[in-house]
Image (tube, rainbow, N blue to C red):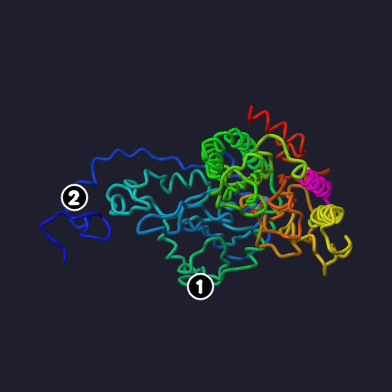
Amino acid sequence: MTDTTRPPYAGTRYPKLAEVPAFTEFIARGWGAEPVPAPMVDGAAEAAASHRRRLSERLPGAVIVVAAGTARVRNDDCDYLFRADSDFVWLTGCQTEGAVLVMTPVPGGHDAQLYAPPPFRPGDTGFFANAAHGELWVGASPGLREWAEALQIGVEPLPALDDRKDLGGALAAGAVSEALVAEHGLEVSPQLGRNLSQLRMVKDAWEIAQMRLAIDATVAGFAETVREIPRAVEDGLGERWLQGTFDRHARTHGNGPGYATIVGSGAHAPVLHWVRCDGPIVPDAALLLDMGVEANSLYTADVTRTIPASGTFSPRQREVHDLVERAHRAGLAQIRPGTVYLDFHFAAMEVIAQGLHDWGLLPVSVDEALSPSGQFHRRYLACGIGHHLGLDVHDCSKAEYEDYMGAELEAGVVMTVEPGLYFHANDLTVPPELRGIGVRLEDDVLVTETGSEVLSAGLPIDAVGVEDWTKALLA
Ligand code: GLY
Ligand code: MN
């Protein structure tokens, strides 16, 4: 039962401050109101306008609804950090939670309208009572006018979306909520998702510049992380310390890590997505670092190096690294306009299969291993050799096989090349000296008009280069 002799506790669930007139009247006044500029990355609005034009040409006549999404609740009124949907960001340059883009066909193209939640300002109950969006809780936010100026499109308050009676059958994508779909009769559209993935495969000059920022920051983050190895070893701080070091760098020099940072020492290195990072840094083991900074525009890098924690590879680690390097170079050589996307994958796989055969690890010939009904080498390399990269680490994932794996590369594609070899500590098919060695080499590569450019070339790829680079940082 409510104890009416004691004052209300908080603004939301328990006896409500919002029901105390003296309080609401007092808290509504006496606040200065400086406009808050919309947080836009330079050039993002113009890039988004061009992306909308490209989508409009693909789907003339379709009403299109794409939503930014909302943060997932972690507990009570505490949410996970919000990260806007990538299709929405590609079309708007805006990262505001809860916003919805509606593109309506007009003669010659589409009209774009954003519906965004207005900030809870002084005088609104949410100002003091909404922990997710109240300015008293989360700080002042840009208003709709500031967003309209920054985005160069019309911006209406989100509740005005309820008044749109023309959205039945509209194609929907992004983080569109079930409630919005049901309320307006939207059609969550694989066709729209596929078109967006197809369009996002070819990056424009602004996007490539954003990816260079992300990749350069990542290269710097590798150096910062490697410099912390002695501390991680000597103070027993382990993989967690290196993961935290890179994540701090990513948050300082970008929006944050573009995916869960992988730091795998020794027997953890062969684990493809070792994000637990709760082990020690073993001083004489290989250390796999798979890390990417997501820029403030949300474009991300995805780079891997495997380094000797001591500065010098053991002979076996070196042999594995050399084979992965040969596969890497074979894959890179296939990246140019006109090759089919999967060519680089098969070129790298051939080198891996031949190398494993030479080491006596395959129970069949190289041809049998490589045949569709064999694939024995994949025991030691179960994942693919790369993927598209952009706003998402595994970018353009709504594309169909023929748009992606079977499509010809064209200038503007950015992709990773990332062969590896993964000999698990408990794999009894390999000699004991190979068990617990995992090596991956991953670069981010831009397809150019005449060939390709390795955007992450600031890091060495050969074993001697990796050793020299590591030693210089440990000195
Ligand atoms: N670097 C993470 C991945 O490609 O899966
Ligand atoms: Mn990758």
- Give the prevailing secondary structure in the magenta stretch: helix
Residue drawn 73% across and 39% down? Answer: 313
- Give the magenta-colored segment's residue range: 319-339
Asked whether residue 253 appears in the rendered view, the answer is yes
Q: Is residue 135 left or right of residue 466?
A: left
Task: Assess whether mark 2 and mark 1 are in contact (beta carbons under 8 angstroms).
Answer: no
Q: For the residue carrying disc 2, how many other residues have a C-alpha within 10 Å: few (<14), some (14-19), or many (20+)?
A: few
User: Element type at marker 2?
Assistant: helix
x, y percent for residue 49? 60, 49
Q: Is residue 102 left or right of residue 349?
A: left
Q: Quadrant of residue 378?
A: bottom right
* Quarter of the figure with the N terminus: bottom left
Asked whether residue 59 appears in the rendered view, the answer is no
Q: Nearer the viewer, residue 356 or 272?
A: 356
The residue identified by callout 2 is 23
Q: Amino acid at mark 1?
A: Gly
Q: Is residue 271 above or below residue 26?
A: below
Q: Amino acid at mark 2?
A: Phe
x, y percent for residue 375? 80, 64
Q: Is residue 148 magenta?
A: no
Q: For the residue carrying disc 1, how many other residues have a C-alpha within 10 Å: few (<14), some (14-19), or many (20+)?
A: some
Q: Nearer the viewer, residue 418 or 54?
A: 418
Q: Determine the residue located farthest toward the front in the rendered image.
A: 432
